[in-house]
Amino acid sequence: MKICTQCELPVSDQTVVLKKIHGEELPFCCSGCSFTYSITGEKGQEGISMLYVGKMVLGGFFAMNVMLLSFLTYSSEFTKALQIGNLHNLNNIIQLIMAVPVILILGLPYLRSAIQNRRFDTDTLIAIGTFTAFFFSVYQIVIGGKVYFDTACMILFLVTTGRLLESSGKARASRMLEKLKVQLPHKVIKIHQNTETEINTSEIQIGDIIKIKTGERIPADGYVLWDTVAVNEAMFTGESKWIEKHPHDKVYAGTVVTDGILTMKVEKIGEETSLSNIQRLSQMAKLRETRLQKLADKIASYFTPAVLIIALLCFLGWWFIDNNALKGFESALAVLIVACPCALGLATPIAQYLALSKTAEIGVIVQDLDTLDKLHLAKRIYYDKTGTITEANFTLYQEVWLKDKFTYLPSLLAIEQHSNHPLAKSILNYYKNADLTLPVLQNVQNYAGKGIVAEYENKKIVCGNEKLLLEHEVAIPHELVTVSEELPVVYYALDKELVAVFAFEDKVRDDFRIFQEKIHEYYLEEIILSGDHEKSVKRIAQQLNIKKWYHSMVPQDKLDIIKQDKDVNIMLADGINDAPALAEAEIGVAVSKAEDIAKQSADIILMGDLWQLTEVMRLAKFVRKIVISNLFWAFFYNLIAIALALFGYINPVFSAVAMVVSSLFVVVNSNRIYYWN
């Protein structure tokens, strides 16, 4: 798999186009990208914009000369002079010579696109309109009639102007996305056996220990080894406030150390870092069509053949009813050009392209643009509890040992090392200073939403919730009343005998309360889906005034509830066990500290606090309003313009101007998203 040099999208090894430019062999997804890059030397929409500028300069020069010669014929004195000198046909031939480069430079791409696409679209109308005008004019030179080279040339020039406006709008959006592409340092200090060595960033390996000084960007993902440092994660979170990072806290490539010297262990490098993943997801999201875009395309697919029929009827009507074939030709040509659904084609993409860039600016990654369109339809929101509503780092506040603690503690710590659950991490953190030799376990098995089981010296160790222990025939005495049933509990058993019980305290995240206040503005039904004990979930639900909640749920239970919901819904979660529900939900949202598999399953990834989701919902509402106004304008403007052209009130050149005005409105209206705050 390679990346196209021009559009920067993935291209398979089978379809890649390789071209040598300045002595270097570069990959392209198609000949169009290859041509654009070889001419402009710029990537993405910047290169396309520059190509349009070049076309307009060359094509515009010849088009203006054609227009000048054409306007002179409208002067009675000049017309008389042409007739006296019998130069009228010569003027037409000069127009033909000037029009040929315009057709080749500006017209051929539309003709090629119309033929290759094999479907009715914008390019079909442009190609039919301009090439009909051109070849009809060539025929008119032969018979000594009126020519329409000015019409063909100006239509192409004005349509290309519209495409330049479109490309400029997309280029602006691309520049916003480019803010994510920070320049990582070329050199970094590597620590090996207490020796510091400066190496190239490209030489960093997973597991390396590296040092980053104040003011430098972090070149890879990893975690802090020792000391506390301050890091600016504005590019991910949308907030300029620096964040304190303590030992074992995660740090990300592209962020900046603002205070202290960071010593970190590398976990991800190159294309595997969060920064690269964000860039890749943003690029891929631009390729996906939304429902509104599909609707606009469907309208255009029916609209274009309808316009061709109307233009034909217009020509026949003027010819047979008014006996004026030339007027019929001009009116039909005007209908073809003014009906060109350029604005209809632009109505959705530019707005949502800019919206995608704006979400990245907020610190949110939207993996599918259709998600933005669906957000306003959401009826309810599902929450995972641990790590989403509450802090993921539980505190062990009470333990009850039924057997000798120091005999059985090593086995407990050994099995918990194999678990990623927050409760397991809390136990390990509580006993992190215990100087113990841990046994080696066999047949370790994780049970999602329940706990973990292993074997040691032919004895089974079970560590998890009440459901897991009952499944493994471990009895839980009723007299354990000292352990609160309202808090998360972990049971530890060895050889079918209960050894210890641990109770944990968790608290509601500060940013969740802020988020909940804002989410109430959207009147969504709130539901908690949790794998925790009934009274633990009930306690949190009562604190937050959430009326509906489910407890003791395994991943399949969560998945089943989401499947049963036929309305548009949102699932907000963070864990590995939430991945199936995130994937099934209409809109899956992963929080910033979510596991990688949860992020891969989600439609939206929050890189900062939970309030970012409400900001995206507010943006989505604004974007939808822009898109609908664009579609309304494009559709009804075209209908009115077609009626005027049909009855001969506007000529083909004026039709081209009207079409560009329509496209200009859509571009300007969409650019309001750029200034959204």
Image (cartoon, rainbow, N blue to C red):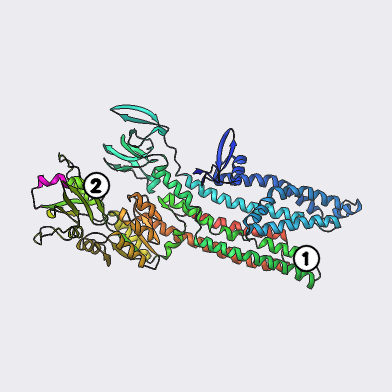
Residue 406 higher or lower than 342, as above or below: above
Q: Position of residue 212 (x, y in %)?
A: 34, 34
Q: Residues within 10 Å of mark 2 (few under 14, many from 20)?
A: some
Q: Residues within 10 Å of mark 1 (few under 14, many from 20)?
A: some
Q: Position of residue 328 (x, y in %)?
A: 76, 66
Residue 227 higher or lower than 646, as above or below: above
SS assignment for the magenta stretch, majority: helix
Specify the segment rendered in magenta. 401-411
Task: Quarter of the image for the C terminus: give it.
Answer: bottom left
Q: Can residue 247 be found in the magenta stretch?
A: no
User: What secondary structure is found at the residue carrying circle 1?
Assistant: helix
| Amino acid on which the number 1 mark rests in the picture | Lys
In the picture, the disc for residue 395 is: none
Labels 2 & 1 near each other (Cβ < 8 A): no
Question: What distance separates the C-alpha of mark 2 from that of mark 1?
Answer: 83 Å
| Amino acid on which the number 2 mark rests in the picture | His
Give the labeled residue for mark 2: 418
Q: Position of residue 1 (x, y in %)?
A: 49, 44
Horizontal side, residue 254 vs residue 95: left or right: left
Residue 439 vs residue 436, the one in the foreground? 439
Q: Earlier in the sequence, mark 2 or mark 1?
A: 1
Asked whether the viewer can see residue 516, the reply is yes
Give the labeled residue for mark 1: 327
User: For the point 65% across and 44% down, which residue is it?
Assistant: 54
Horizontal side, residue 219 vs residue 487: left or right: right
User: For the point 86% across and 58% down, which residue is it?
Assistant: 143
Q: Can residue 405 be found in the magenta stretch?
A: yes
